[in-house]
Image (tube, rainbow, N blue to C red):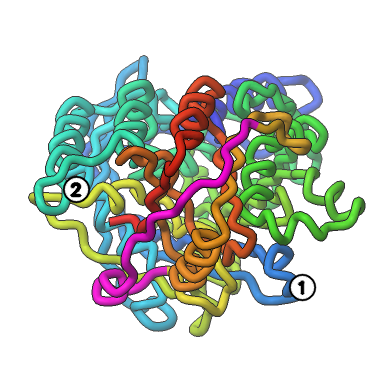
Amino acid sequence: MTSPHWKRFVWFCLCLTLSHPAWSAGGVTIPGYAPATGVERSYRVQKATETDMSFWFDKSGAPPVTARGAFRQAMTVLSRDEDGMRIRWSLSADLPEGIAGLADSYQMNLLYRNSLTAYDTATLELETDLNGNPRNVSGVDQIVAHMRAMAANGPGGVPAAPQSGVYDIIAKLEANPLQIVAALVPEAQLLATGQSYKDETMDIGPASATSRDEDYGGVSVPVTSTWTLESTDATAHTATLSLSEEADASAFSQSQQPAIANLMTGFAERAKNLTADQLAFLKRASKSRSVELVVSLDDGSTLEASEIVTVEAGGTRLRTYTHIQREDMPASLLLPAVLTAKDLQAPDLHIEPLPSAKAGPGILDELSTPPAPPTAPQEAAIAADNDGAKAIAPVSLEVKSAEITLSPVSYDHGLNIVLTPESAATFRDFTQAVLGRQTQMLINDKVVMEPWMREPIMDGRIVLAGTDRKDLEAMAEQLRVPGAKILVRLRP
């Protein structure tokens, strides 16, 4: 959602602010980032996501579902000149020693291992600016070619369907190779947040605010950033800075309306019974970010970073935590409890390893993102084993009517499908059996939708949204033919 170039702009604004005469001559000077070349630095990285969808399951106060990961990554500055740097990251999905809790509670590591397999790499070479912000990735052609080969050789040699999302991911990587950085080594961008290419003098205590605009789906959202030098440590020769960011609530809410409308469509039965106040609450959205950074007063490098990002929209809340610590330096920041807890309310995810030679497109869709928000009641399993999948056969559903309608929430067009009474009963039983799992809907043997089954569908109605109106009209015509049917199945 966030532009990969925003951090460079933040530092540009920050440099202008810090050079203003308001900064006293007796302040603390943070040196420009001047890392040693050829020296490998190891970092311990801990991450977690908390997803709260209790509103939609009418379980106010239920604990959020949490997923986390723990990693040990290494970075080497290969070269540096007046224009930028070349950096190599050595990547691993292995759990470091001494982590809290059981290994199977670190599901992000399993997803990340599949990501490294999908990209067919354990190293990533980046070209960065002098702050360390990535601006180019080496080997993009080889990565994309490997992913295309995997998509063309899915399970049983069956190519990935265009609707599966794999080719959309590949197109995004080709259009913006920095998506690879966001997927495999977002640590590079967080570390760069605390680094400036030139010396900066700051006083302890006073806050400095800057602003910028970010694009969210074509909506320009103002974001206010506030920097503060919190303290210095003469013994460790470090400075601790804080950064807080807040997106404009009105503009951010506007940008999230399509996503909120889709969420309400997925919980159609629950949405029908919401009050006016609840509907108004659902349409509000917010985003905030809080960062603490420990920076070396020797070479200007970020030694430790802690970040919390909170997004609330459509009655859901997603909070992500990241902590990075260079291993040769002592830790000084407090870790959030979620990163050290031994017991968590974790999703019951069954994550199969991705084969190195052939890959299933369903796993490719995961990439290195954290597990998706729970799509069924939080006590229900989100994935089932292969034997369970085989036990639930596809169902063929007869269509009673198919009409194009306009959503009163999003003002987008959708295809409203009503099943015959017999098929409605069949569909009700099917949706009850596949709760928490991903399905496919096919019209004339073409996959048109791949929804996760969030709740049983009792009324025999299916709404197909998020598709071009001409495509919707074409599907409506196909379904108005006497005897027209829809095939619904578990996603292979």
Residue drawn at x 41%, y 56% is: 439
Q: Is residue 482 visible?
A: yes
Dot 2 amino acid type? Ala
User: Is 386 contained in the magenta span?
Assistant: yes
The C terminus - image quarter? bottom left
The residue closer to the viewer here, 259 or 408, is: 408
**Within the magenta stretch, is there residue 355?**
no
Above-or-below relation of 311 to 456: above
Q: Quickly name the residue at label 1.
A: 60
Up the image or down, 75 lies above or below 457; here it is above
The residue nearer to you, when weighing 431 against 208, is 431
Comes first in the chain, label 2 or label 1: 1
Q: Residue at position x 52%, y 28% from top? A: 472
The answer to which image quadrant residue 250 occupies is top right
Q: In terms of secondary structure, where does tag 2 sit?
A: loop
Location of residue 441 in the rendering, given as x and y in whole percent from the top left corner: 41, 48
**Is there CB contact under 8 Å for labels 2 and 1?**
no
**Residue 298 in sight from this viewpoint:** no
Q: Which residue is identified by label 2?
A: 122
Callout 2 crowding tier (Cα within 10 Å): few <14, some 14–19, many ≥20 = some
Q: Position of residue 187 (x, y in %)?
A: 42, 46
Along the viewing direction, whichever of 124 and 332 lies nearer the viewer: 124
Amino acid bearing label 1: Ser
For the N terminus, the image quarter is top right
Up/down of 419 relative to 14, above or below: below
Which is closer to the viewer, label 2 or label 1? 1
Residue at image coords 83%, 58%? 274
Q: Residue at x 68, y 49 (%)?
A: 264
- What is the magenta range? 383-404
Q: In the rendering, at what x and y percent does residue 181 appear? A: 36, 37
